[in-house]
Amino acid sequence: MKTKLLVWLLVGWASVAFGAQNVVVLLDDSGSMEEQMRGQSIRRIDAAKDALLTVLAQLPADANVGVLALNGSTGNGQWIIELGPVDKSNIRGAVEQIRAGGGTPLGTFLKEATDALLELRAKQIYGTYRLLVVTDGEANDGNYLNAVLPDVLSRNIVVDVIGVDMANDHSLATQVDTYRRADDPASLTQAISESLAEVNDALGDESGADYDLLEGLPDESALAIISALGTNSNNPITPAAELFDTPHHLQPVHSTSTHVSTGPSPVAILAVFGFLAFSVIVIVSKMLAGQR
């Protein structure tokens, strides 16, 4: 009876963990985004704004979404839309204020966006957490970007990148979870839509049947799997100033923590091993069931 209760707890956890979306769109509003798309009569920044307006208006009501511009009106990054439930009545006014101009500090604001997702996850614990980078060029702070990206990915933050009208694939193409090219307005809208529509459905429609396999486990083992799968490191990403001699103007605009993250925490490692153990149990059990 106790094991069945644990199984149903895990099923309930999964319905929450894989159901809610939490996404930050990191938008490149650098000077090069002012240029027209090749073979098109529209500027890259306008195509990006149109695509955002189209996709954000179609998001489900339970999605938490933020839009962070690399430069913004402050010249040092700006939350165009603060991370949280989207007020669709204010989307157009917020997005239309975006103007192109400035550099491409992707590393600095990858941290800024990730920290916002981690802070939200620390409060609500479960859900899927995704960072979508929309850019037309390489980072000005490439050393910092390369230093923090592995840490970001280790936190179970899904990172997608869209290369906007780029002659070659972005250097991040082989390092992130998903990379898409967008060489015209239609493909840009489609790329953003596909990224924001992706929810981790690894459990599939047969998730309930899969969890029935836990009924043969001791209560302690089932509970350990539930606990491990719900545990992630939500400490802030290491600031650039603590890795390099970085000018002040390259610091995140909302950085308030002095905590230093030195890599995956023990609880993050435990979560990974817990998930792997659960996956092995499911696969082996299905193989044995198929042989009967």
Image (cartoon, rainbow, N blue to C red):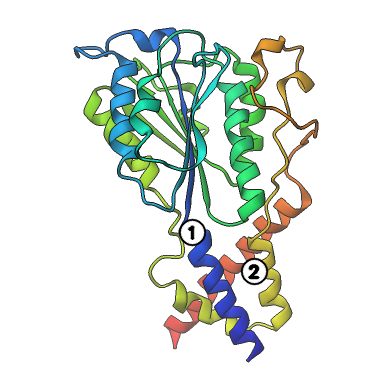
Disc 2 packing (10 Å; few <14; some 14–19; many ≥20) = many
Query: Does residue 55 lie above or below 39 as drawn?
Result: below
Between 115 and 139, the one lying in front of the other is: 115
Assign a secondary structure to mark 1.
loop
Query: Does residue 92 lie above or below 278 as drawn?
Result: above
Residue flagged by tag 2: what amino acid is it?
Ile
Which image quarter is the C terminus in? Answer: bottom left
Give me the C-alpha separation between circle 1 and circle 2: 14 Å
On the question of residue 155 being in view, the answer is no
Disc 1 packing (10 Å; few <14; some 14–19; many ≥20) = some
Q: Which mark is residue 226?
A: 2
Q: Earlier in the sequence, mark 1 or mark 2?
A: 1
Q: Position of residue 199 (x, y in %)?
A: 42, 52
Within the image, what quadrant is residue 241 found in?
top right
Q: Position of residue 284 (x, y in %)?
A: 54, 74
Q: Residue at x 69, y 74 (%)?
A: 223
Can you identify the residue that label 1 sits on? 18
On the question of residue 180 being in view, the answer is yes
Q: Position of residue 43 (x, y in %)?
A: 28, 13
Q: Residue at x 53, y 55 (%)?
A: 127
Q: Position of residue 261 (x, y in %)?
A: 76, 36
Within the image, what quadrant is residue 125 found in?
bottom right
Between 158 and 31, the one lying in front of the other is: 31
Q: Residue at x 57, y 43 (%)?
A: 157
Residue flagged by tag 1: what amino acid is it?
Phe
